[in-house]
Image (cartoon, grey):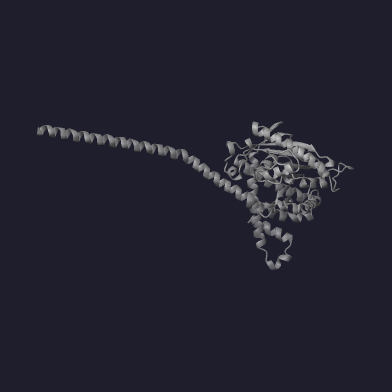
Amino acid sequence: MEATLRANSERNAAASVERRKREKAASERERKGAAVVESDAETASSPMDVRKMLTWCVAVYFFLMTAFVVPIACVSTFLLLTPLLLVSRPLFLRLENRLCQFVNDHWVAASAFCGLQVVEYGDDVAEIADARVLCLANHLGLVDHFVIMNSLHAKGRVPGSWMWVIYNIWKYTPLGVMWTSHGNFFVNGGPNKRQRLLETFRKHLSDYFWSWNYGWVVMYPEGSRLFMIRESAARFAEKNGLAPLRHCAYPRTGAAHAVMQVCAPSNEDPSMALSGKGAPIEYLIDATLGYPKGCVADIGSAMMGEWPLETSKIGLHYKIHKVKPEWADEEKLKEFLYEMYKEKDELLDKYYRTGEFAGEKRTVQVATWTIMASQISGYLNIILECTLLRALLTVDSADLLDYSLIDFVISFLRLSVD
């Protein structure tokens, strides 16, 4: 009996040891399997994390360059070019237009980095790139600026000689200072300021549009981005007995009418503007921007390469109208523009449903050399400004009034060689 009990105890002990071995082996296999899964997950997520980090770094780079470095460098260069006005205005304007082109190329480079793809439809505005034009676009989001600049960046002299009419919020930023030096005009809404603002704008056009050889005037006549004015736009339509619009807002005609009062062709001499200062604005372009299914991209997300519906293709439809002298009458211009915006609303409705505008389709191509050249030009510009600053700092303040331009140039060249 005792021997039997001892044998059973030994068998139980051996079974227990064997069970513990199996449990330990299974636990080891599970541990190794979990480690492999975790390692695979880390391997899979690691490239994604690196890409996000690189994207964030490049986005910060473009933001700082676009909002601060490039504007400051360009304003400094503009001030240095200003003395050329005493020697040769055409030379000054050519250099200033090239400077403006460089800034636009930088914006285009930023949009290309974000993955923006612009698809044009309708009339080919490249055919009137060298004409004088009023371009009216609907306004949906801050990415709109990049869309227009991307679309027009390779169309003749347009991006070097256009005048933008921009909301006043940007005026006191480095971007605003740069745009002011180029001659862009800032508007600040409100009925109490309307007449005074329009009078100032008419004077601005009369004084600078021809003397500074501008080509296009670009504006968003709705007044602001659609999501900000949707309710007030609906009230405006109801108050004026207009059919409601779903995808855009009826334009405020004041600024466009001011352009026509100054720049429209004269009835007596169609080759001369009403102001008598030079050749008139010949064309009005209706530019219709559309985002896929109406999902407007947020500029912060776009800078990180994150687009709604995972597509960065933005549609832009152009329709060219020949300017009529009668549009100097605000009521006639208003009648035309209201009808134009009804058609724009129908265009957008179709685009949001089908993903296509009507008319010929053209994908805008951004050359790699444009992206590279814009960045290299930026660095060269910064180096130039730093060298000039060093040259200025070598001048004794007591002798500054006696310091001639030739002396300054010699000092600058000497520092450049060093």
Q: Quadrant of residue 354?
A: top right
Relative to residue 245, is residue 45 drawn left or right?
A: left
Question: Residue at position x 71%, y 65% from top?
Answer: 400
Q: Quadrant of the N terminus?
A: top left
Q: Nearer the viewer, residue 242 or 374?
A: 242
- 56 in relation to 81, above or below: above
User: Horizontally, is 270 left or right of 310 in the view?
Assistant: right
Q: Quadrant of residue 344?
A: top right
Where is residue 44 drawn, in percent x and y?
A: 46, 38
Q: Position of residue 23 (x, y in %)?
A: 28, 36
Q: Quadrant of the C terminus?
A: bottom right
Judging depth in this view, the residue of 16 and 66 nearest the camera is 16
Extreme residue in the bottom direction? 398
Q: Is residue 1 visible?
A: yes
Q: Where in the figure is residue 325, as x and y percent of width and height?
A: 84, 41
The residue drawn where x is 28% and y is 37% is 24
Q: Position of residue 94 (x, y in %)?
A: 75, 48
Is residue 127 among the parts visible in the rendering? no
Q: Is residue 80 above or below residue 125?
A: below
